[in-house]
Image: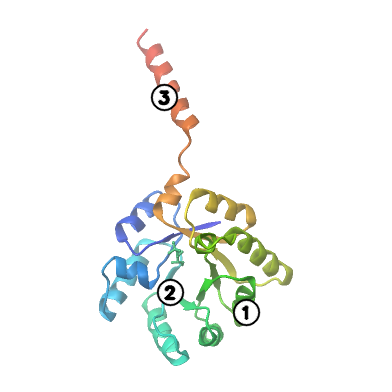
Amino acid sequence: MKFFIDTANLAEIREAHDLGVLDGVTTNPSLMAKEGITGEANIKAHYKAICGIVEDKVSAEVIATDYEGMIREGKELAKLDDKIVVKIPMIRDGVKAIRYFHSEGIRTNCTLIFSSGQALLAAKAGASYVSPFIGRLDDIAFDGLDLIGQIVHIYQNYGYETEVLAASVRHTMHLIKCAELGADVVTCPLKVITGLLNHPLTDSGLAQFLADHAKAASK
Ligand code: E4P
């Protein structure tokens, strides 16, 4: 399973990359705004900086919601770097834009997926990735992980090449369950990745090993 980090913060992207387990990055307009990145030139420069850190794909989201606008913005984003994946919302014109980009050999990530029907539509249109939002479904008392399982199952039934990129991942159990369910990629905040490190038995076991070593060495 691939690990993507869901942030536009360069320090966090570097930290995850330095850990040696990061594949790619996803961003969205809210995450870019959180870093104070505004204006076309700054946004493009920021995406280039992100692409300079990671080895795998970087999702960059269009702002336009009409077909022509999404095509124009998506082409501009795709030109920035080979790693860029154009992130397109699951709306009618978005599906059409995904089909267009597929025919042009430009990778897309269909975002804001909340049902298996939407995921099926995105795969039919030729999306490279779909992003089902687990946490936001959990927030409204629907089981986000169920959706991951359904989409993985449907894609396996028909051999779709679209990758399931589990998004809105809020904690380590989300990530582990996504791995069990067969999601291709998980995108999450840095703390979810580093949270995988923790186990109290690891800490107490290491403390014991070091104490025993020190005792033996002092004899
Ligand atoms: C996906 O690509 C989105 O950027 C993201 O995972 C949304 O997560 P949130 O629901 O925690 O904002």
Give the Cα distance between marks 1 and 3: 53 Å
Q: Is residue 67 left or right of residue 146?
A: left
Q: Is 163 placed above or below 95 here?
A: above
Do callouts 1 and 3 mark residues in contact (Cβ within 8 Å)? no
Q: Name the residue under label 1.
A: 121
Q: What residue type is labelled 3?
A: Ala
Amino acid on which disc 2 is placed:
Asp
Q: Alpha-carbon neighbours of circle 2 within 10 Å: few (<14), some, or many (≥20)?
A: some
| Residue 207: mark | 3
For image coordinates 47% across by 55% down, the residue present is 170
Residue at image x 30%, y 56%?
Answer: 11
- Disc 2 vs disc 1: which is toward the camera? 1
Q: Which colour scheme is used?
A: rainbow
Is the CB of mark 2 within 8 Å of ligand 1?
no
Q: Which of marks 1 and 3 is nearer the N terminus?
A: 1
Three-letter residue code for mark 1:
Leu
Where 202 sits versus 179, above or below? Answer: above
Q: Measure the C-alpha gap from mark 2 to mark 1.
A: 25 Å
Q: Which residue is drawn at 45% across and 26% down?
A: 204
Residue 199 seen in this snapshot: yes
- Classify the position of the C terminus by image quarter: top left
**Label 2: which secondary element:** loop
